[in-house]
Image (spheres, helix red, strand yellow):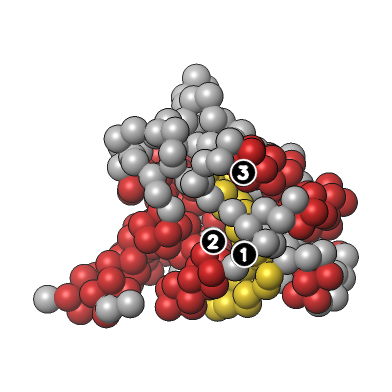
Amino acid sequence: MTNQERRELSVFACKVRMGIIDIVHNAKSGHPGGSLSGADMMTYLYNKEMRVRPEEPKWADRDRFVLSKGHTAPGLYATLANRGFFPVEDLRLTRTLGGYLQGHPNMNTTPGVDMSTGSLGQGVSVAAGMAKAAKYMKKDVNVYTLLGDGEIDEGEVWEAFMFAAHYALDNLCVIIDINGLQIDGRTKDVMDTGSISDKMKAFGFSVVEIDGHSFDDMEKAFAAFHACEGKPTAILMHTHKGKGVSFMEDSAAWHGAAPNDEQYEKAMSELRAQLAELEAAHE
């Protein structure tokens, strides 16, 4: 990856984070923490990895993305808007009565959303079904799904993993955001899963561990996904919840809380400074 590509992705990710903060502040509710930790991965998926057409959201041969941790919809919406699926200005309408950007993704109203999600565990199950359907129909379609490390407490998740391995779904890429926090605190205290890598390997996955804020790591991980045959891939990305906003980082308190006006200004000031620094580096 060139420095120019890396910079462009960083600029996009910063704009996604600004969109996330705008969304939760204007709605006075939402989930900023996990949205911010996944912003870099969402940026890479929609700009480098996935075959999509913003001008044709229902293109039959597109790759599919399922946000299994559906409560982090602000991250998905900000990504889709900045990618051109709908106007960035509409992000301020999230969670408004009658609006098309609801608190959780709705495939029936939002351009670019491939599956309605929210109940944890169900998204990855649907993604596995999509991958199986693509195989059955002999379609060259890859399916990507993003889960939280708190979400994998759900038993349904592991049923989906068994299904994916049993049917050798090498067109399925399961991405787990390991930020170590969930709504009730640290994941190791709420439900210690031990080595997620060992468990995914035992369930029949090819496993790649990365820094979830490194675009270079993502590039290598997806190259490994495309090279893998006969089994699904799990990308375990280690991240910081609330990444990009100093007072939100590594804090479970910001799992599902909206900033007040003062906190909003502080967060946006930090992100604007990051954006200015990135853009100045190009000049």
The residue type indicated by label 2 comes to Gly
Q: Is residue 139 left or right of residue 241?
A: left
Which quadrant: the C terminus? Answer: bottom left
Instruction: State the mark number for residue 229.
Output: 1
Q: Residue at x 54, y 30 (%)?
A: 107
The residue type indicated by label 3 comes to Lys
Which residue in the protein does label 3 denote? 135
Q: Is residue 97 left or right of residue 82?
A: right
The crowd level at tag 2 (other Cα within 10 Å; few <14, some 14-19, many 20+) is many
Answer with the quarter of the image where residue 136 lies: top right
Q: Pick whichever, 272 or 156, lies toward us.
A: 156
The crowd level at tag 1 (other Cα within 10 Å; few <14, some 14-19, many 20+) is some
How far apart marks 1 and 3 lie (CA) works out to 13 Å
Q: Are marks 2 and 1 in contact (CB under 8 Å)?
A: no
Q: Is residue 84 left or right of residue 245?
A: left
Instruction: State the mark number for residue 38.
Output: 2
State whether residue 97 is above or below residue 154: above
Task: Say whether disc 3 or disc 2 marks the residue closer to the N-terminus.
Answer: 2
Task: Say whether disc 2 or disc 1 marks the residue closer to the N-terminus.
Answer: 2
Q: Residue at x 61, y 43 (%)?
A: 135
Give the SS element for disc 2: loop
Q: Residue at x 76, y 57 (%)?
A: 165
